[in-house]
Image: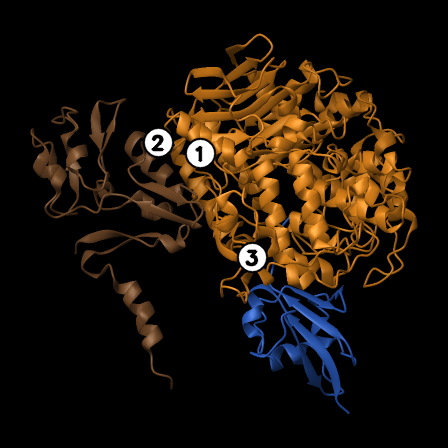
Amino acid sequence: MSKKITVKLFASLMKFLPVNSTKSHGFDYKIDETTTVGYLIDDLKLPRNVIHIVLLNGVYLDAETRDETPLNEGDTLGFWPPVAGG
Amino acid sequence: MQMSLVIDANKCTGCLQCEMACSYEGEGVFNPTKSRIKIFPFHEEGIFVPYTCTQCDEAWCMHACPVEAIVLNKETGAKEIVNDLCVGCKVCTIACPFGTVNYNADSGKVIKCDLCGGDPECAKACPTDAITYQDANWTGYDKMKDYAAKAMPAN
Amino acid sequence: MSWTKKVLRINLTEGTCTPEPLNMEWAELYLGQRGLATKYLTEEVPPTTDPLSPENTMYMITGPLTGTMASTAGRYSVVTKSPLTGAVACSNSGGFFGNEMKCAGWDMVILEGKSPTPVYISINDDKAEILPADEIWGKSVWEADEWLHAKHQDPQLRIAAIGVSGEKGVLYSAIINDLHRAAGRSGVGTVMGSKNVKAIALRGSKGVTVNDPKAFFEATTAAKKVLAENAVTGEGLPALGTQVLMNVINEMGAQPTHNYKESVFAGASKISGEAMLEARDSDGKPNLTRNAGCFACTISCGRISTIDPQHFSVQNKEDLHPSYHGNSGGLEYEAAWALGSDTGVDDLDALTYAQFVCNEQGLDPISLGSTIAAAMELFEEGVITTEDTGGIELNFGNAEAMIKCTELVAKGEGFGLELGQGSARFCEKHGRPELSMTVRGQEFPAYDPRSIQGMGLGYATSNRGACHLRGYTVASEVLGIPIKTDPLETEGKAGLQIAFQNATAAFDSAGICIFTSFAWSLEDVAPQLDAACEGEWTVERLSEIGERVWNLERLYNDAAGLGGSADKLPPRMVSEAVTSGPAEGKVNGLDKMLPEYYAERGWSPEGDVTAETKARLGL
């Protein structure tokens, strides 16, 4: 059974957004039962060396454990390069 | 190969690193008012434009100097001020159509860009490549390449 | 070398401009800018002084690196006793004013006393004059800027000025230099206005030298390389500016919304840095035109933007300055959250317009937005009505109301002057002090301290009142710089805050921008200072200076009655849990962090600097 999640790409990662994505930088994405964050990163061809902050439903995923993190129906996954401001 | 300063205003952020590098090379202090290159902010248009001497071949300043204090550096193509000869008459500042030769009241001589003898400090200091030092015969190379990319046929 | 070792003391009561030597003994201990001027303040202005009286003094000061080729080295600070907080005020600004002061041969310009009539200060190298400003009193910063350039026939003058708000006594008025760079917080512009000083116009031709040029070029070139190769300072900040934070902070549930009632804002992405890049319908242009650098800055996070020409804010306004129809200093994150999510306004052009007004009239957009948001909550609760607001329907999300309030505060008129007293006084007046999101009377910045615990401790202990620029643990808690810590955890946050606070105080005293600290540590700063200045400047010495400066500020606040008793957060932060998002159910654990903080600082359990700590730091 497939699941639907929302993927959001920000800052310099916006260039990896599909052409028809919404103005809130997100798009819906269908995944398989067993899809993990790591699998999704590769599936979307996101550059691993650029990804710095990954928020799953707003909660930071540690770089060490992020690849194995499973995804569930309705999850929102946000990706950022290194960013800061003030 | 003769080289030229190439300016791309779209890349300039107005930080004045070039002015400081220039004043330090020329006067030994960090002092934008003693820089041979100037950044002009056009506030409402939202753009910063670096401007300095383009080293004209038939240089108005050189021809106008009554004491032959402006000479051609054959290696770099720069028109250089010979301080020992300059009498501070300022005729060159009037002759130059671009305003890039200016009088320095502290020394009583004029100052202008001399390409730092072939290794311009402004270009080295620019953090965004708004000022680069390139083959004088191909100053349009980057622009041409940009437009070539646009004309590239889809494959 | 590097310091000019000269101070210009301007007594406005007497009408005198007197050069004096910089106190180099103090410079050895407090470096420059924030640290050194605070030392002058503590020696010259008693902590109980009325901030708006002639007895208060204002210090405009550079750091030893200011005016050099070190990256970002164009900074100056304004130090005084704040009329908003009563505590020490120190506001730091970029642009091109600080380097010009240094080039004119002055480390610091001191304004003391009060002029009997409106004046401006003209400084051209050694020549300093107090000149009449009657023609620009009542005009905006931008109008004063044009008038001064024309009057002196000098397009290269660098000008810092106050707007009408600062003349009228709005308590969070800023000093604006170079049209849109601000010494923004704590009402330093109000102090300038209280002295009847409209502007300072500078021209310097002397230049700046350093102690060991060869070592200096090596150190600054290496440090610039660090900035260029860092993903944040080399790529993120130039591309999206501070506004890159809007979506991150919102997605993680720390976006202050509706006067901090909520911490997720539905309209965040519409007012984000990413949104500033999107082409609009009316003219096909994006809000953002380009990025811009302050003096010597190789990061260049500044935004140059336009307002949609079709937007209501710029329609049918005949007396609008032409800059509103062109480019000006655009939206920064702190303005965007305060005027945007906190008031519930998700209209990017309305926010850009309000930011332009803050620049034109010299206002701190954080305190402004936050005060409007508090007034909106009072309005929605029925505590104030259209009778109080002069007919404005002050509901959350009403962009026109936000703009109207901004314009009224900018002019210091009617309801605007009331809002201009800041949210602490406004809420107090209307009997609901708990709705003011302030510490020491200064409004919160952009991070919900229930969702980012360390920032709560930072706000509570910040010497200039709630502030993000005194100890930016967001870097660690959210962004993973230099290492990632859990934003919802209180453990370890006391030590983290102290480390950030001390390092920041050192950066703020050197003449460089705190944004370099996303890539630099004191290890990168020390060699630059060491080459620029006489004597030895090591990481250890800078760390100690940072700690000394922090404690000196604290001692001044203590004596002003704003020490440990003021280390408090509003009740909403410590007893009302977050209602939605990733931090749902959380309150700030200040009670856990504060005792640990006091202990690690070497302070008493009441938060007093102990005799031991004073002795250790030479205070």
In the image, residue C278 lies at what x, y percent?
55, 65
- How far is mark 2 from mark 1, CA to CA? 13 Å
Q: Which of marks 3 and 1 is nearer the N terminus?
A: 1
Pinpoint the chain carrying mark 3: C
Q: The brown chain is which one?
A: B
What type is the residue that disc 1 sits on? Thr
Q: Mark 2 points at which residue?
A: B33
Image disc number at residue C521: none
What type is the residue that disc 3 sits on? Leu
The verdict on a common chain for dots 2 and 3 is no
In the image, residue C54 lies at what x, y percent?
67, 14
Image disc number at residue C240: 3
**Residue C319 visible in the picture:** yes
- How far is mark 2 from mark 3, CA to CA? 31 Å
The verdict on a common chain for dots 2 and 1 is no
Q: Mark 1 points at which residue?
A: C68
Q: Name which residue lies at 22% across and 36% down.
A: B101
Question: Callout 2: few (<14), some (14-19), or many (20+) C-alpha neighbours within 10 Å?
Answer: many
Work out whether residue C203 or residue C24 is closer to the camera in this orientation and state it.
C203
What type is the residue that disc 2 sits on? Thr
Pointers 3 and 1 in contact (CB under 8 A)?
A: no
Find chain A in the image and tell me its colour. Answer: blue
Pinpoint the chain carrying mark 1: C
Work out whether residue C15 or residue C517 is closer to the camera in this orientation and state it.
C15
Find chain C in the image and tell me its colour. Answer: orange
